[in-house]
Image (cartoon, coloured by chain):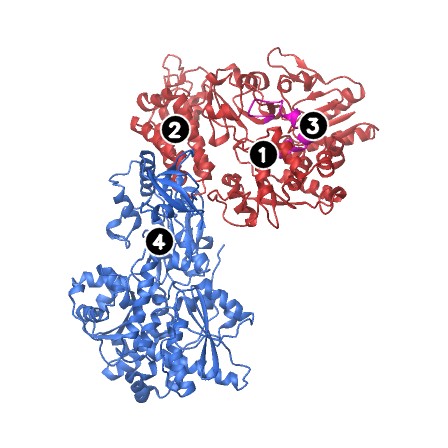
Amino acid sequence: MHLLVCGGTGCNASKSQEIAENLKSTLTDKGLGNEVQVILTGCFGFCEKGPIVKIMPDNTFYTEVKPEDVADIIEEHVIKGRKVTRLLYTDPENKQHVADSKHMGFYKKQLRIALRNCGFIDPQNIEEYVGADGYSALAKCLGEMTPEQVINEIKLSGLRGRGGGGFPTGLKWEIASKNHADQKYVVCNADEGDPGAFMDRSILEGDPHSVLEAMTINGYAIGATKGLIYIRAEYPLAINRLLTAIGQAREYGLLGKDILGSGFEFDIELRYGAGAFVCGEETALIHSMEGQRGEPTFKPPFPAQSGYNKKPTNVNNVETYANIPIIINKGANWFNKIGTEKSKGTKVFALAGQINNVGLIEVPMGITLREIIYEIGGGIKGGREFKAAQTGGPSGGCLTSAHLDTPIDYDNLIAAGSMMGSGGMVVMDETSCMVAIAKFYLEFTVEESCGKCTPCRVGNKRLHEILEKITKGNGTMEDLDNLRNLSRVIKDTALCGLGQTSPNPVISTIENFYDEYVEHIKDKKCRAGVCKSLMQYVIDPVQCVGCTACARNCPVNAIQGEKKMTHVINTELCIKCGACIEKCKFNAISIC
Amino acid sequence: MEMINITIDNKPVQAEKGQTILKAARKAGIEIPTLCYYELDGIKLENRPGGCRVCIVEVEGRKNLAPACATEVMEGMVIHTHSLRVVNSRRTVVELILSDHPADCLVCPKSGKCELQTLAQRLGIREIPYQGAQSTYRKDMSPAIIRDIDKCIMCRRCETVCNEWQTVGALSAVNRGFEAVVAPAFEQDLEKSPCTYCGQCLMACPVGALSEVDQTRQVITAISDPKKTVVVQTAPAVRVALGEEFGMEPGTIVTGKLAAALRKIGFDYIFDTDFAADLTIMEEGTELLNRISRFTQGDKTVKLPILTSCCPGWVNFFEVNYPDMLDVPSTAKSPQQMFGAVAKNYWANQLGIKREDMVVVSIMPCVAKKFECQRDEFKVDGNPDVDFALTTRELAELIRQFNIDFEALPLEDFDKPLGESTGAGVIFGATGGVIEAATRTAYELFTGKKLEKVDFNELRGLEGVRSATVDFNGTPINIGIAHGLSNARQLLDDVRAGKTNFHAIEVMACPGGCIGGAGQPFHHGDFDIIRKRHAAIYREDAGKPIRKSHENPYIQALYKDWLGEPCGEISHHLLHTHYFDKSKHIEIEG
């Protein structure tokens, strides 16, 4: 029997480490230390209900486990073979406990390829990775395949870059392989920066060897002997696990000189990023690694021609790499049967927002938004109406109910005015104001712009200011025209991918939710009740009993009224904090 | 050169493979506006960050617009430089730049010479539709350069010049997004950075974010004061560039009009730094010969090569970067400071006035001279030998303020005795000139023979690093020349490593020497202007009746009447200086 405890950052923060230790010590106390193994794994993805403890081989899936629950799990489940029902996942539809993960809606439609080992093996033990076919792809490449064959296999698989752009990976490798130099580099882009996205971190925490193996294969394919992983310094757990994994790989002769006796040499080092979003752009990433200011430069030259230290460099994202070993092992023809015509394989999404099952999911390309939201995601919180899904991070756009049945792949998302990006998916309902959403994302890009080119440095700032003006109720219809023109010009003229996509949230919300903009501008109304400047708190004199609770709790003394008399809010003083509504027991206060 | 066929604005054009769209278009006579792009072809300096996005063009088949400065032409490319899409985007981009730029053009030091202003006019911008927050930054006043970073448009020209051409590394981009600016490390003031005050940053700055400290007001006050005797000196490079400020062809020699203008403004004595340049040759040439003869006699303590010390930017550079080699440069003061010392000690005495009642103003092609004259070692009881160093541009402003019709001025002479000079003094203004002037004198002093051919063409030119061996009657003298501190660094690193056999090295910080100094009229990246000034310097030299410093009768008289001999007691006291280790001068605060 194996007890798998989620060791991802989220569950880790909710004491999963302590749970694992408690399990181990309790088992030892009961004399079961040798028979039952406790393994701290990578992320299971079901972060909504973490910490997760999964019991194998029967796939029992315990959610929201606390260190105190350990005794019950051991006593009941391990010793007596009875499931601890109170810890089982409850289906929100029929309120029934679900006995194991295979029957959970969250997992049914998922296909875990990149995340295949996350939540399954101990990431800190190379032997577990080897036990799960790890490093067999590398052995196959070095032993049976020429570099050209490796590249062809990846080309044939149809794998496209998972970092955002969707550039065909095999083609990228081929270009780098054809540029000759005394030294080439393989770089793994682990500068995950989209707000809410954490698939790269999860892979590195849960399955670091898959990335090391893939990078080594990449090095063999293009003729590079050095690999660098550019990782944000804010990912300490991922960094630790990577360092452990690199140490183990070196010890096992899977990194270093003469790998597996093939004569091929390759080693990997880490480079730490300071968390600038723009450093996910490959030229900026390379400059940052070189110790330069992290800002993009014009392409060409592409990194494949002149990258790190001016040498040919292949940059791929973590998730892209995680797909490589399994493609080599199972073959391109296995992989390219999954997905849609031009988008093969699966995609990991970080599901967030007003959705029941927040977490990390991996789905085949071509799945619909409806399947993701209603089957995997378990529907909208509180049974409310779906309004939009924002994909592609701050550079993406919004999908609406019109897109619910559109198969999700690179090209369809772009056609729908959004993009794949690195796979952020924020689900919104009627409580989300689309103008405020656009403003939120612009605030991010304004903050994260490197400041090198005018459209991004000044243009995004102006976009944000206009949105601010509209949400404050001071917008004009001319502002709407300016937003559109400016968005178009920024997209058309910005230097790098950040600027070229940063107006997407503005364009797509204007496109899909034009009425909401007009309401903000003409009617001075925010239907979602998000834009505070457009709201007024009023007390209904009929409902108010004069209990004084609201007046006592108002932080700015904006509410006046005698005891047992109707109270009144002075709207000029009111800061719209909502404290009064919370305290009113008579539903007398409303927002209009 | 492989040629390819492209189409620009419906016109078939042949372009070189690997060329940028901008260069191909310019060659075809199609002008694409630029802003951040900056090129000084004569010194192979190019700034093309592709940041301003003003030069964007439409390339058929490409999703977004392409920056012409950074996009290479490809066979069959079809380019539109002024399509509706381009014109609208370009205009919006410039409107965005203007929306974060102070609208204080009326009092901006760059007004009328500002490339952003010119561009806005060209694009017909009369209002800025995108109003919003304005970047604000503290004003940084150094002794020579003012940074008014509210005006910075992030073109990065200054950064490129400072890092690539000068390898000074005082400026780089800091902060992100809307707050991004170019600043010294840790956003220190320039004064606490390794800045040499060469001023090439402000020469490159398209707007008024970087400018020189303006001292015209103090000079007018001094002239207006009846108790003050105001003496002016003008550097050699000024006379071949000042005319540009008044619409004259670059390279026009305006020495006579310059003297007339200074007299009209009201200076009491119109003297010439060229005189002090001749004096410098006497001192530095003698020092060189002393070192060479001691060296040939086996003195192991003697340092060779000797390095020239006329250029204040260069002096600042080696004080910060080569503190271990402070005994290598010549101890001779620069001509500006030699003049100041002679004026306040000798000339004031001749006039019978106290040094406090004399004000020495210099007209310089240079910004670092403003710092040099403020150095403590060039002051006596707080009173500087040179009170104010104005740039060529500041002089032009004075001439305009005094409503002087420059072109109509008669040709006048400098006053005597400190206004008489030789051709050797004139060529101080161009790279290689100081060493050529020194060679003319040193040859005759060393060999005792008359120099038949005074033109040393092997020492002239605009290559960054040059070297030549001059035959001193059987003794080969090896000479190195560098302009640009990157080139100087290359030579100095070799000297430090003991890899050279030079006897003397001349260094000038600015492109082409003082003619390309940061106090000169703005050339906006047109290196032909520097080439024309360069030619003019040598024309002026060729036209001089006396072309060797030691033959200047007024220099001879000065030694006879006052100084005694070169490198003698008085010279040692008044005409020579010493250097300081400033490697730790750069402060880094937490």
- Give left or right: position of A442 versus A250: left
Residue appearing at x 52%, y 71% in the figure = B495
Spatial CA span between label 3 and label 2: 61 Å
Q: CB under 8 Å between callouts 3 and 2?
A: no
Check the rendered structure and report the hue given to chain B: blue
SS assignment at label 2: loop
Kindly identify which residue carries mark 1.
A169
Spatial CA span between label 2 and label 4: 47 Å
In the image, what residue type sits under mark 1? Thr
Q: Position of residue A187 (x, y in %)?
A: 60, 42
Check the rendered structure and report the hue given to chain A: red
Mark found first going from the N terminus, 2 or 1: 1
Kindly identify which residue carries mark 4.
B205
Q: Is residue B508 above or below residue A299?
A: below
Kindly identify which residue carries mark 3.
A330
User: Nearer the viewer's eye, disc 4 or disc 3?
Assistant: 3
SS assignment at label 4: loop
Q: Are marks 3 and 1 on the same chain?
A: yes
| Magenta stretch in the rendered image | A318-347
- Mark number for residue A575? 2
In the image, what residue type sits under mark 3? Lys
Spatial CA span between label 3 and label 1: 17 Å
In the image, what residue type sits under mark 4? Cys
In the image, what residue type sits under mark 2? Ile
Residue appearing at x 17%, y 69% in the figure = B264
